[in-house]
Amino acid sequence: MPQICFYFQLHQPYRLSDFNVFDLSNDTDYFSKDNKTIFQKVSAKSYRPMLSLLLKLVNRHKEFKFALSCSGVFLEQALEFDDEVIKLIQKLVKTGQVELLAETYYHSLAGLYSQSEFNLQVKKHNDLIKELFNYQPVIFRNSELIYNNYIAEQVETMGYKAILTEAVDRYLYGRDRTKPYLSYTKKPLPLLLKHAPLSDDIAFRFSDKNWPEHPLTVEKYIKWVEIYPEDHIVNLFMDFETFGEHQWEDTGIFLFFEKFIDEFITKSYNKFVTPREVVSKLDKNKLEVYDVPEPISWADVDRDLTAWVDNDLQKDMINKIYELENLVLKTANDQLIEKWRRLQTSDNFYYMCTKWSNDGDVHAYFSPFETPFEAYRHYSIVLADLIIKIDSENQLEQLVAK
Amino acid sequence: MNKNNVFMIGWEYPPHNSGGLGVACQGLTTALADYSGKIYFSLPYKFSGSLKHMMLLDCSHPDWGKEIEQPPFFAYDQYPALERVDPANLDLNDLAALSHSNLEKQVNQYHDQVVNNSKNKDFSVIHAHDWMSFPAGMSLKQKSGKPLITHIHSTEFDRSPVGGSQYIMKSEYQGMKFADRVIAVSAYTKKILIDKYGIDSQKIKVVHNGIDPVENTDPGNHHFAKARPVVVFMGRLTGQKGPEYFLGLAQSVLHHLPEAIFVVAGNGDLYQELLFTTAHKGLSSKVLFSGFVRGNQKSKLLDRADVFVMPSLSEPFGLVAVEAAQRSTPVIISKNSGVAEVLPSSIQADFWDIDMMTKSIVELIKNKDLSNEVVRNQNNELKDVTWKSAAQKVTEIYKELV
């Protein structure tokens, strides 16, 4: 009989092209033409059918609510490659039953590496959400639910009212993940924590035939959710692409979701909520603190940063891209700055991950490169070219000044 | 004048070659055809097409499958199945039974096929290229009573400076012992044959490799990375070629020339390790890996290079340095290389002498006059690096023996 808080993440990176040494200073595009075909493919399999289903369900049940978060680079590509996706989201937002969350425009790790970039990217995202959907987000979610006390502090100064993140037991110490917490900061912010087992039952295990619970039925799933008492919130956070892309239509994922909403809501004691709604009703004085000194995330087994910042390939590239901040901004060349920011998208570093076992399989599934080494190799060459362009812009600037 | 027919035993021939052996056999036989009688040339596979200058003999074994079109293993790839031994502990007189690897079996099968194919062939001298062909060369000498020349393009000592295959070393040793003459591709190699294999120096003749002249050279920095100094390494990424020293060199040069770009071209067993080292040293976006290059890309890279470096630990000849010189690139080559003997005006360094090489690179890049002078002198020396000259020397050796 708990409350369910759904949040779905929409994101597509700008994947790199096959940029090689011979392209240095030759104006080859950094980003692949495949981004268009990939977007349209995912749109046909997931974005369009699932957004349409959500619209149908929202119209069918006035009590059905949920949250979406769309990265800026996702929205840009939607506008360019399939603007029907934007129209569907606009229709959803108009119903008033859909909340939009704040995040970084470039789905970056800026929150950990550059406060100024973090601020700017969140602001830029906020502006785009207002422009496209006439909507002001009040709740923040960081790329990949990456979170620590430091990020909370920055988000608080930006004026957001709460943050979504992962429930990680090394910081939760056995406490309930179905209760809101407070950040460990000077001015505490409410935190909503993802219910990983129940979220991942849908997002990862739904079609896994080796899973003892396969096939997952609506009856079974409702039973698992209803274990929780009324004042608890089950936060089901997952990638939007779960529906139709990670789990294909023939697994029955759409039918499962529709039936689940229909059946859950028929019982009067069951309730859907959005993060904003949860936070508006909270008594902060009753919440316990969730102290997270080291960054956590929703990825892999360890729920830490090792998907993006683990081996030397990843570390050196991330350091290199953020070291460029002052130099690239000095050029005042919008095109260059834009390219630099697109290169900050976390997926670039995810592709360079060399972890093994199940996590490695998940990484390989998402990567456009055959190996993490190819991902690193191409990124390194692209970055060399960006540095060449930045230097020549700045030198030109100096000459003009003289 | 009576021209001698030659029975040559080869292993690979362009386009199916993994290293310099195939290229050298092509250059030598093409020039030799003008001086010798008929040339028979055996290969362990069916060569598609035919050659004008000599008669190819398909000596593949039926066990290898129908009409294989490349060698059963590439001569200079890794030998994963072989035991590694320290050459210092190798008793060259101990010819006791060795482990039967697949490799050994295939070399023996090739031997049988070559001996079969030699029947009814009229020749007055046997010329065997590198260890894979030596068992066949020895049997042919025994059966026919004709003189045997073993041609050393590279030794196991070069390929595995820290200890190679005992079986291969013994094959090399036996072949050279049994031969009437040994041809070494350089005085550097001759010295190894004397010092490491105990071969009689009187028996060894040095015949340097030649190179085919190139017409379409286009040196200059217009190809890519126009405003940057570009330093190039090209070769298999394996211990013998010293790519790790190139990374150390890059790090050192960057202290003096922070805008320089270092390109590593090639593939090999050290590839991943080199990427990690590059990142660990913080050289991402400075040291760039192009992958394996051939054809136009290879020419373009050598045309573009401001300096070419070959820091090999041991290099019997080092054709790629000559190719770089042909494209008007000043080359820095390891003292442990044969090519130093034909390009004395190139810059020669101990492969480990990072300071000396750093100084040279910085000078060559900062001082255009110096660079031009080195190129001019290299060009003069290149005039004598011909296959014609090599073929003449080989013809003399044939005459002495017949």
Image (spheres, rainbow, N blue to C red):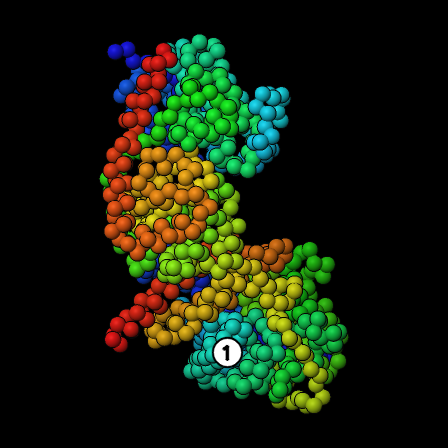
Residue B367, compared with residue B21, is above or below; it is below
Q: Residue at x 34, y 67 (%)?
A: A391
Q: Residue at x 27, y 21 (%)?
A: B34
Q: Amino acid at mark 1?
A: Gln
Residue A250, compared with residue A335, is above or below; it is above
Quarter the C terminus of chain B occupies: top left
Residue B48, given in percent of the width and then of the height, sits at 38, 29
Residue B42, given in percent of the width and then of the height, sits at 41, 22
Q: Nearer the viewer, residue A269 or A72?
A: A72
Judged left or right of residue A95, residue A25 is left
Q: Residue at x 32, y 26 (%)?
A: B390
Q: Nearer the viewer, residue A33 or A22?
A: A22
Image quarter for residue A82?
Answer: bottom left
Judged left or right of residue B5, residue A168 is right
Q: Secondary structure at mark 1?
A: helix
Q: Nearer the viewer, residue B7 or B180?
A: B180
Q: Residues within 10 Å of mark 1 (few under 14, many from 20)?
A: few
Whether residue A336 is visible to the viewer of this picture, yes or no, is: yes
Residue at the spot of label 1:
A115
Judged left or right of residue B35, residue A114 is right
Residue B131, compared with residue A281, is above or below; it is above
Pointer 1 chain: A
Whether residue A374 is visible to the viewer of this picture, yes or no, is: no
Residue A392, compared with residue B327, is above or below; it is below
Residue A256, given in percent of the width and then of the height, sits at 63, 67
